[in-house]
Amino acid sequence: MKALLYLTWRSFVNNVKRAVRKPVTLILIIFLGAYAVYVLFMAGSLVTELRFDSADGLVALVSVWTIYMFLTNFIGYSSRKGVIFRQGHPHFVFPAPISPKLVLIHSAWLNYLLSIVVSLLFVLGGVTVFRVEPWRMALFFLVGCVLEILLEVSLMVFLYTNESLSERFIKGLGLGMKIFLGVMALFLFLYFRREGFNLETVSAFFDWPGLQMIPVMGWSIAAYRLILTGPTTLNMVCTALYVCSVAAAFLTASRMRCEGAYYEDAAKFADDYAEMRKKKNSGEMAVGIGEKKRKFRRISGDYRASGAKAVFYRQLLEYKKERYFILTKVTLINLAASLIMAFALRENVAWSGVPQFFLLGMTAYMTLVFSGITGKWEKELKNPYLFLIPDTPFRKLWYATLMEHIKAFGDGIMLCVPMGVVWGVEPGLICLNILIYTVLQANKLYAKVVAQCLVGDFLGKTGQDIIRMLLQMFIIGIGIMAAVVAGILININLVFPIILIYSIIVTGVMGALASLRFDTMEQMD
């Protein structure tokens, strides 16, 4: 027991020390701190303007978080992917003469830390923004940090260490929860489609008594409603059921026998998690842990090229071997986000009378969201032969990124067309938005080279990503301001052509700067 406590504590301390030693940590802390203050200030102002700054508004936010955490925890624990194990655990921790339950509970310390931090944020927001009495928020924190964590630990132990139930049954529970999540999403879609998506319908949904009657998850929401808004017959009964269910779950988990059968799955998860981190650090999009082995298509034919053009054809062959060619997870996310926002904001966009600017805003926002994903370009920079090809730096840079530009054009179509069609944007403006998205994605690739040359390894990869993101935000902000001024003073129809021309010029300059420094990057890798 003491060894596990020491390991957990030292893991936390070493992570902090490792972060503090990096020069980028101070910059990152300042940046994230300033951004957090800005977000909290803006969120508080928005909540006040919408007259949502009451206990009912806080209940709605807490309900969203409770539903999200319960469903994700259940799905994660049932698939045995909800606790982060390191690659050293199978070699040093699992063979130790320690109860497998204790090993599991101590390994999930990051999960408990997240619950505590979120509870503190809710307490801070409840006292300052939502004007809830301090004693109520203190009781709220107690419930969030005691009952919620006890329930989470019990659920985790039951799903991980229950050796009396078959693997098929445990996986069936996870599948059932996913089906429940799908049904709930369909219900929400139909509800908001019929009632409309606005503040009144959202509040009405969270005030719906049936939400509090959902076993365990709804009962916890009822407990928070009891604390924040006062007692009713329904929330008192549901709170009592919640306390009893937590007690029953804790007693069941504490008496459950466990011989460590989950160690094999945990060891595989540790390797999968390390692989996922490796992909993430290399700029690839990793949305899952332990993804299935990819299947490639058989292709025929050959391509002949010389110089830097050979890099483009090699990438083209790699994409042709993929099952869906250039369609990736980013494409699917763009399509899903476009469909959701198209119908969710349809009434607000129609009321504004300027749907083209909503489309432009979504284009800029999604560009920043995916600013950390560079696709095959990140891998290309690590290949020594790219720098050894007998060709000019500009041609090498162009042909090494050309396939990514084509892919960005396809992603832009998936993002802009559904929203543009539903919102009634003119086809010409939709095409301009697609081109703007493509050019901004190209700017991201060239900014990667510029940022790497500016800071080198001094700030590490995180520092390079921060510099690149700030460059993009600055470039996008200047372009939008210039276009808005021109639209107000001259003609509003000039906004999109100005932004496109400005983006092309800036991206061309960024590409030229990147090509000038391209020869020196081999020594920096």
Image (tube, rainbow, N blue to C red):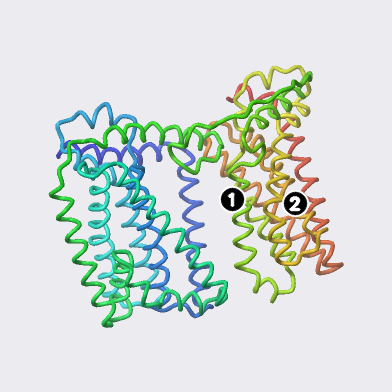
Foreground: 21 or 404?
404
Q: From the viewer's perspective, is residue 375 above or below residue 347?
A: above
Can you give x and y, in whole percent of width and height, for residue 170 in the image? 30, 46
Specify few, some or many for label 1: CA neighbours under 10 Å numbering under 14, 14-19, or 20 or more.
Answer: some
Give the left or right position of residue 108, taking residue 386 as reference. left
Residue drawn at (46%, 78%) of the image? 204
Identify the residue at image location x=60%, y=56%: 337
Quadrant in the rendering for residue 92: top left
Q: Which mark is residue 449?
A: none
Name the amino acid type tagged 1: Ile
Q: x%, y% of residue 271?
A: 39, 31
Specify whether residue 5 is in view: no
Amino acid tagged 2: Ile
The earlier-in-sequence mark between 2 and 1 is: 1
Where residue 238 appears, x then y in whole percent?
26, 73
Q: Where residue 267 sits: x, y (%)? A: 32, 32
Choose between 35 and 418: the one closer to the eye: 418
Residue at which label 1 appears: 333
> What residue appears at the point 56 percent right and 73 percent down from the top-left corner?
197
From the viewer's perspective, tell me whether residue 275 is left or right of residue 8. right
Mark 2 element type: helix
Q: Which mark is residue 434?
A: 2
Residue at image location 28% in from the left, 79% down from the top: 234
Disc 1 is placed on an element classified as helix
- Within the image, what quadrant is residue 9 found in? top left
